[in-house]
Image: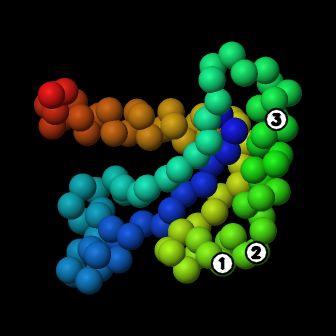
């Protein structure tokens, strides 16, 4: 995994407009959209690091950041480990919700 960046929480804007927030509905949980770049499992570490460096350079561009901000997004540069942690944390968090709600695969 090379990079992470997240979009802002548009649902919060909708929730505020309706007089509530996501945490009012499910305390301790916030849903947001995020996007990242991944690589196959056995990709050499030097390739991952090079990609990560180039993505971080690209997303540091003020024009890109402005464009994403105008769309409601926020860019978060990071390391492969940062992105791996995000995926792990999100999987654990939403896995609990899936189990508690008894959601089944269709």
Using the image, determine if residue 85 lies above or below residue 68. Answer: above
Q: Residue 25 location in percent, x, y?
A: 21, 61
Residue at 55 percent across and 80 percent down: it is: 70
Q: Residues within 10 Å of mark 1 (few under 14, many from 20)?
A: some
Q: Which mark is residue 62?
A: 2
Q: Residue 8 location in percent, x, y?
A: 48, 67
Residue at 38 percent across and 39 percent down: it is: 93
Q: Earlier in the sequence, mark 3 or mark 2?
A: 3
Q: Residues within 10 Å of mark 2 (few under 14, many from 20)?
A: few
Along the line of sight, which residue is nearer the eye, 42 or 94? 42
Check whether the beta carbons of the residues at disc 1 and disc 2 lie within 8 A of each other: yes
Q: Which mark is residue 49?
A: 3
Q: Which mark is residue 66?
A: 1
Q: CA distance from mark 1 to mark 2?
A: 6 Å
Element at badge 3? Answer: helix
Q: Is 90 situated left or right of 47 in this image?
A: left
Element at badge 2? Answer: helix
Along the line of sight, which residue is nearer the eye, 14 or 24? 14
Q: Is 20 situated left or right of 67 in this image?
A: left
Residue at 73 percent across and 61 percent down: it is: 59
Q: Earlier in the sequence, mark 1 or mark 3?
A: 3
Residue 16, quarter of the rendered image? bottom left
Q: Is 89 situated left or right of 50 in this image?
A: left
Element at badge 1? Answer: helix
Q: CA distance from mark 1 to mark 3?
A: 26 Å
Residue at 82 percent across and 35 percent down: it is: 49
Using the image, determine if residue 49 lies above or below residue 63. Answer: above
Along the line of sight, which residue is nearer the eye, 55 or 18? 55
Residue 6, quarter of the rendered image? bottom right
Residue 74, quarter of the rendered image? bottom right
Check whether the beta carbons of the residues at disc 3 and disc 2 lie within 8 A of each other: no
């Amino acid at each position: 995994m090379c990079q992470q960046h997240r979009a802002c929480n548009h649902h919060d804007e909708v929730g505020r407009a309706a007089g509530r927030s996501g945490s009012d509905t499910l305390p301790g949980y916030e849903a947001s959209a995020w996007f990242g770049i991944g690589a196959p499992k056995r990709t050499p570490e030097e390739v991952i690091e090079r990609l990560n460096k180039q993505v971080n350079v690209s997303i540091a561009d003020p024009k890109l950041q402005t464009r994403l901000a105008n769309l409601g997004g926020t860019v978060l540069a990071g390391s492969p480990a940062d992105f791996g942690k995000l995926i792990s944390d999100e999987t654990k968090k939403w896995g609990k919700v899936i189990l508690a709600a008894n959601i089944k695969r269709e």
